[in-house]
Every structure is written in C-alpha cells, then in structure tokens.
Amino acid sequence: MTERYGPGIALLVVDVQNDFADRAGSLYVAGGEQVVAGINAEVTAARAADSPVFYSQDWHPAHTPHFVTGGGVWPPHCVADSAGAAFHPELVVAGEVIRKGVDGGDGYSAFSVRDPSSGERRATLLGARLAELGVATLVVVGLAGDHCVRASALDARERGLSVRLPLALTRFVNLEPDDEGRAVTAMRDAGVLVG
C-alpha cells in the first residue's frame, strides 16, 4: 500500500537488516525479506515527493544486557560492523540512518533507547530531526511489527505525530501467541492508522 507523501510527511524504515530479514539471520523474522520490494516502492514515492526518508538500524556491541548472553531475552543480533547488522542487500537506502542500541541499551524505538539496568530512556536524534524538517506525519514500515515498529510508532504518537502503518510492509516475531494482534490493538488504541 503506497501512502501519499509530500510536505510535512516522512518515511521511517525500521531495522530492515540481515539478522531480521534474511533466513540465515540470528533473529530472522518470518517473511521479513518479503517486505523489501514494497518498502523500496515507498522510498521511491517519498523521494519523488521530496519527503525525507529515515532508516533505523540496530547497532549493538558484542556484549550487552540486551542479549540473552548478558541477561536479556534476545539472541545476539545486529552486532556493530557485522554482516547481520548490515541492511538487507536489496533495500534501497536513500536517507539518514539512526543507529540504536549503540551503547548496549535496549534500542526498540527509533526515537529512544532504554538503559536495561536503570530503565532510563534517552532520545535518539530522530525526534529532533523530524521537528527541524517540520514533519507532522510519519509513515512507519519495517521489522518487526510487534517490537521495534510498534515501539517507534507509539513513540511517534507520544510526540504528537500522526502515524500511518501499512501492515503489508511489516512482519511480526510472535514470541507469544497473538503478539501481532496485541501490537496492532495497542497501536490503533494510540491513534496509529494501521491498514
């Protein structure tokens, strides 16, 4: 589903990286590779309308409390400078990249990172960049719908942005049964236009 772009609208592509979007990735999201072509069409549409495009990228240190090896819940993934952390080779990257989890924090949202020990949240550069550009509406696509996409969409709503989320351009981890349904409900309840 291609959204309309133009003044005040930006596109955020969340974590379309090899560890999530490649079957050989350490935290493969089933069907993750299937969203790449559609996301590329969104990038083309946004750029044609002079709408800014941003990309979030997990960029973890090798040892972090975010990983199961450090007491977290996730297998090691998207370790800085690894092949798994690289964007999917077919993804068109034509915009600013916002790296998250760089200091070992939980980088679910493209807007903020959370210290896994203290719970303290710190902003990334994304919110300030969108404000500088006068963005009022954000189209969010990418991986995974029940984690980083959800967190980014909810953070955007907290910041007063209108948010559109085309479901065809995300996939879900579903660690627990119906995580997808709960994520979609939470986003809709927050005012995200999910379709």
Image: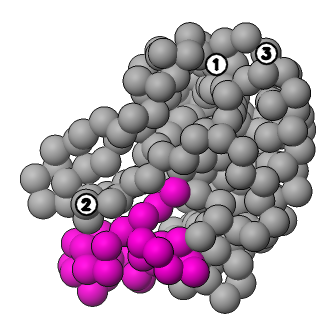
Residue beneath label 1, please? 137
Task: Report the side of 7 relative to 55 (left or right).
Answer: right
Q: Is residue 178 above or below residue 98?
A: below
Quadrant assignment, res 48: top right
**131 or 177, nearer to the observer:** 131
Count of picture labels = 3
Locate residue 173, reporting x and y percent. 59, 67
Q: Nearer the viewer, mark 3 or mark 1?
A: 3
Find numbered disc 2 in the image and state the secondary structure of the residue it sits on: loop
User: Which residues lie in the magenta part?
Assistant: 57-85
Which residue does the numbered mark 2 point to in the structure image?
A: 103
Mark toward the viewer: 1 or 2: 2
Q: Residue 71 in the image: x percent, y percent?
A: 21, 79
The residue carrying mark 3 is: 6
Could you give the CA–CA distance between mark 1 and mark 2, rounded to whole angstroms?
A: 29 Å
User: Taking 48 as reference, is 105 above or below it?
Assistant: below
